[in-house]
Amino acid sequence: MSRSQSLRATARPSLLAVMLAMMLPGAVLAQSEPDELTGVISASAATKISLAVPPVVANPGTRAADAAELTQVLRGDLSFSGWFALLTPEGEARIPEGKYADATAWRSVGASYLLTVGLRPKKDGVIFEVRVVETGGGEALLHKKWGGVLPKDLRRLAHAASDKIVLALTGNPGIAQTRIAFVSRRAERDKEVFLMDYDGARVRRLTNTGTINLAPAWSPDGRRLTFLSYLARKPSIYLLSDDGDVTTLHPAGGELNSAPDFAPGADQLVFSSDRDGNSEIYLYDLSRNSETRLTRHPGIDTAPCWAPSGREIAFTSDRSGTPQIYIMSADGSSVRRLSWEGRYNESAAWSPDGGRLAFVSRIKGRFEIVIHDLSSGEEKIITSGRGNKENPRWAPDGRHLVFASNQSGMYSIYTIRDDGTQQRRLTRGMPSWTPDWSPLSR
Amino acid sequence: MRLTTRWLIPLLFVMAILASPGCKTTGGKINSGPGTNPPVEEPAAQVATEPSAQEASEETLNGEAFGERELVAEDLGEEVATTADEIAEGMRVLDTVYFPLDSPELSAEALRTLEANARWLVLHPALRVVIEGHCDERGTTEYNMDLGAKRARSVRDHLARLGVLMDRVEVITYGEERPAELGHSEQAWSRNRRAEFVLETP
């Protein structure tokens, strides 16, 4: 088995990327913030859908700032999705403002599709309208209108519109309405659970315990988070509902419990605990309040992660002498070792389609993120450069991952494409760890 | 310093019952050996002053009977003050144990530290001790939780071999969450791979 280093994300667009961008009239380099590692258009850019996204025009009675935010959010979502090469008049396409809605003008500069957005005043709030047409003519592929929209909800509606556009043009669900849970520190000795939109906007705190909370993990329906907390002095597992309700799995406490993960379908959790003398993995049935021990080994067994099928569980064990990734059946039988390269492999996360496992691997003294293809056995290292990258978790589209890294000095949350491109930093000015990407919103 | 007062009174009482004979028994054993006699006799001697002088002189002929009689005379109020002093002393005396990278193994130096710590703990049986396992920042968050637990357990198990009663010892892991030293140098890391001792009143 061997590992390949994927295309390295670079701070500047590579020469290849610039050449590709020049060759493809539809390709526009993604806008990047100073320390954002984007801009690499790989060979797959050729297969991207060329979509024109002219700026949203603020009609009389609406605010220019709202129009600008809509433009920014829609472009950000559609570009991030990875499906589209965006054409904008600020980029290579020199389309005058009067022709923003003119499909044939956009067709002449290589756009296959045109997105137009209407923003008009109404008595209460505004009317927000999106329309996608093929530039070659024909009926709208998508036409959606929202009325009575309050300006403060525009951002969320823009995300909803982005998901509809992705679905209409690709047949795949968009992830613009998903969220990321993580922990961040306010005081020197605490970590609280936080939530933010998938693009790093709208950061809000969910717990206020004054102690350490770690590793939030989403329930399959997105209505609950399970996490580890020192609230009752010793680390125990808690559940937080979307209505703010907090419950604990083990009111008696007394054990060292960690790393909970929800089962994909059933009302079950897996977690590790050392109640029987050393770290083992347990299954907890929430409806029956019953517990089953899954591993029996004197080594450390931890960080369990359910396969989307519900039939298998990946976990970390040091039974070979060093931490490595293993897979077992959901009843604890048929344990087999998955990772063989290197001396420290940990924190496995199963891709939504079940075909791949992401985990961290210590390579030359640093943690990098590796993706293991289960059918071919091939492993690809998708990160490189400064600092550690830890705790990879998949986006529900199976095309992106979120992780924590200290590459900028302070641990922060980043997202990245599964091919190692388009790394993007989400949190700033707040140290942050252990992210988990929500399921699709319904 | 984390002093839990919630359990103070009921547990103190229980410990008084449990610990005093235990201490005397241990003291008896150590008395027969060389070297460590004087400090060991102290707790027993303090308690023994409480019954009358006549009783005391009689009872010293028979350790067992002496132990049972003194329970009646236990003074919880004074014990609390003593315990606070003991905690203060213990926090000065009990040294932190350090570990190699990625490992819960006890080095020769760690074993020496634990021997001294165990000696002090045996002499102060009324206190509970929490062993906190910690890691440096280089492992992953989740695995470090378990490595910290493994370190704390390895310390606890060695203390047990040295005669510290397990029912007064508790382990907890903080993984990499509570570094002793901030910073990302080899020196900071080696200071953070550790097991700390925290004393508590019962």
Image (tube, rainbow, N blue to C red):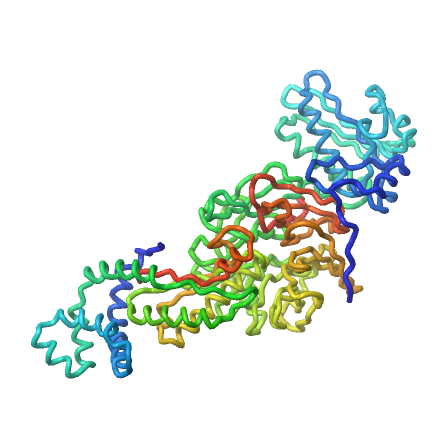
**Name of the residue lying farthest toward the top:** A60
User: Outermost residue toward the left?
Assistant: B54
On the rendered image, what quadrant is the N terminus of chain B found in?
A: bottom left
Q: Is the C terminus of chain B in the top left, top right, bottom left or bottom right quadrant?
A: bottom left
Q: Is residue A148 above or below residue A381?
A: above
Does B135 appear above or below B166?
above
Q: Position of residue B128 (x, y in %)?
A: 34, 64
The residue at 45%/63% (across/down) is B195
Q: Give me the residue at 53% from left, 60% from top.
A: B145
Q: Position of residue B130 (x, y in %)?
A: 39, 63
Q: Nearer the viewer, residue A42 or A164?
A: A42
Q: Position of residue A248 (x, y in %)?
A: 48, 55
Q: How many marks?
A: 0
- In-front residue for pair A313/A147: A313
Task: Answer above or below: position of A393 versus B73.
Answer: above
What percent of the width, then of the height, locates residue A193?
A: 53, 47
Q: Nearer the viewer, residue B155 or A231?
A: B155
Identify the image quadrant of residue B73: bottom left
